[in-house]
Image (cartoon, coloured by chain):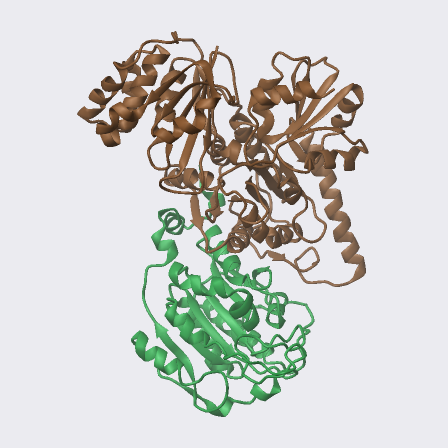
Chain colours: A green, B brown
Amino acid sequence: MKENLRTKNAITWCPSCPNNMILESTKRALTNLIKQGRKKENFAIATGIGCHGKIFDYLNVSGFYGLHGRVLPTALGIKLGNPNLTVLGFAGDGDTYSEGIGHFISMGRYNPNITLIVHDNQSFSLTTGQATPTSQQGYKTKSEPLGEFNLPLNPIKLAISSGATFVARCNARDINHTSKIIEQAIKHKGFSFVEILQDCIIFNLKINNKDKLMYKIPTKNRKIKEALSLADEWDYNLRKGKIPLGIFYQEKRKTLEEKWPQLSYLQKKKISWKDLKK
Amino acid sequence: MRLNILIGGKAGQGINFISEVISKTVTNHGYFTFNYRDYSSVIRGAHNFNILSISDEKIESHESHLDGIIAMDENTIKIHKKELKKNGFIINSKKFIDLKKNLNIALSGALIKILGIDKEFLINEIRKKFDNEDVLKSVERGYITQENKFKLKKLKNDLKIMSGSKAIAKGAINSKIDIYFAYPMTPATGVLNELASKQIKNNYLVFQNENEIAVANAALGASFSGARVMIGTSGGGFDLMAEALSLQGITELPLVVYLASRPGPGTGLPTYTSQGDLNLALRSGHGEFPRVVIAPGNPKESIEKTNEAFYLSQKFNSLSIILSDKHLAESEFSLNKNIKNPLSIKMERKIPGKTIVKASSYEHDQFGNTIEDAKTTIENANKRIEKYKSIKKECEKFEMIKIHGKKNSKNLIIGWGSTRGAIIDAIKDLDFKFLQVIYLKPLSNKIKKEIQNAKKVILIENNLTGQLGRLIREKTGIKIENRILKYDGRPFYSDELKKEILKVK
């Protein structure tokens, strides 16, 4: 039986925007997890502000449409507010790597059992296409008429370096692969980060159609050094190189909930703060 | 009877130790105390002092004229000698210098002798903190150097000591808080530390996020999940939280915010006091949405009003701001041991885990789906205003203002927050009544009548521009001409304030 994760809201993403595919991948991953015994009511999502955020209206699970840049603190709060929930954050590249960068690099240290999915189209598209930290150099926009001067940030390297315990990259168009990676990310105990490369079909067209550079890396245990050198194969500038997809790095480490006795108690008793007698 | 004793020295020498053990000893003897802490933003070395006031009657302030000085260094004498009364005493640490870290114990012993209290009471107090053979010897060393100057006989008052910070924390625990989120910032850190130390025993969580933006957004996330949350900070951190206060307005998730002010703008005077953030508490956050702003004036009010803040935020899914400052947060007051039973707080909203719930920062329909049409926009805005009206009605059940002093006097003083103690003590023997505004938003309708009935009205605030005065003018159309404003980062001394009040024609 297919879980009904659809809502009645009309989809307002641009026709053929890869966000539709990310939505489909998410639905498939959640459906699988529900089949495996997770309750639909136990999922909670947090979204930021940007094109990606509209997924809030299209997924029939509990959610918090937060502020720009604040997906991670919001998601962390949801998890602390009830550690028995399965919490997913959906965010954009501007959202995560610009406005919310301080939250992004703090999450590895905390290692809460939550999943962050970044829709990275290398552009602030809902505000009509300004450069984000992952935009390629030379990208000309209305606010950067001389072209983007700055080197792009490599979020995969940053996530590994700042202690994320599950780091993966996907191609939005590859729904099979993406849905499987999302499913694994949710199952991972700790802070899992999935960066999904997607084309923006309206702005930053030059960075589009890089699928032929992409290849899948085998899932295996890697040391940080090896994972970092894999991440180095592509610098987001699209000059040359190959773009690895898959799980770069995975590590078992105590989660935030396991570290705090108050939270592990709630998990053990399978109750929320509300049900706790004081 | 009232004594003001200054204890001064270098940062890190243990001034607070002396004021603490002396306060506890005299409190156990039934005396009221008030301990003011004046220190700079330096961990070791700078000149710091406390003024400990002791009285057989209720007091909530310190005075500028000193009955005694306990000097842990020569500098203290140099700086404060001119504040000493004619017959005032000085206890110089010079003769105990060989005691090193037990110096403050000897000084406590010397002071307790001057106060005429048996040294055993002091020794008992010190032994609760640490116990070694040197304690006895060191107390004795100080004790024998002095003569009884006063005779503090045991009184029957049943008192304990509490700071504003500890009281706010107690109010939160009484309200069955689930999570306190914060980032350290003086003078709000006292609540963070106090709550952190009691979290396991009382079954709640204290979490320090990476910054105040994360604090406020995470708190709303946790509130969404059904947890009862509070966050705390000072002005600069509060500025960072402002986006999330606005988010509270549209998501309608219960949130309690503790704002402990210090002088600004900018970093200002981090360890001093000011009432400069009333406007900030009233108006921060973009858009138009309801909120409650409550300013307790002493620890008892801090416990009770924090509880009301939680009650209101859960009942109306709204924002409650508790406004305090360094003077209330860090001063130590005598507290009568009986406190009202906390209000019972219920949560009736839906939460994830049981059903599907949506909260949104976008304008949304009743299910949480994003909308942009004009009709729903107006309906939602009207709902927010209607909610404020219901909140205001509920607040009227609580003490939104208090009247102190001579209730029939035609001379009226108006103030709020931490100036309460100095004002009450200043007008003790004067023909004045004092209207203490506790709810700043909503503002009590009774204020206008009180002003209209008075002949002389004086506004007293610990800030530059008289922010309560402006608020009252906005709500009542009445401008209060007489203003006593202090904005040097220091709180009012009650004796100096009395002189200022008498100067107003």
Q: Is residue A3 visible?
A: no
| In this picture, residue A225 sits left or right of residue A28 | left
Residue drawn at (57%, 60%) of the image:
A63
Relative to B15, residue A239 above or below: below
Relative to A45, residue B158 above or below: above
Residue drawn at (39%, 67%) of the image:
A162
Give the residue furthest to the left: B133
Residue drawn at (35%, 81%) of the image:
A229
Percent x, y of residue B251: 63, 53
Q: Between B364 and A5, which is closer to the camera in this rendering? A: B364
| In this picture, residue A15 sits left or right of residue B208 | right
Percent x, y of residue B406: 67, 13
Count of labels shown? 0
Q: Between B459 and B189, which is closer to the camera in this rendering? A: B459
Percent x, y of residue B307: 55, 33
Relative to A224, residue B88 above or below: above
Q: Is residue B268 visible?
A: yes
Residue drawn at (46%, 39%) of the image:
B191
Q: Residue B45: name its quadrant.
A: top left
Q: Between A156 and B187, which is closer to the camera in this rendering? A: B187
Q: Between B85 and A123, which is closer to the camera in this rendering? A: B85
Percent x, y of residue A77: 50, 54
Q: Residue B107: name its quadrant.
A: top left
Quadrant of the snapshot with the C terminus of chain A: top left
Relative to A62, residue A13 above or below: below
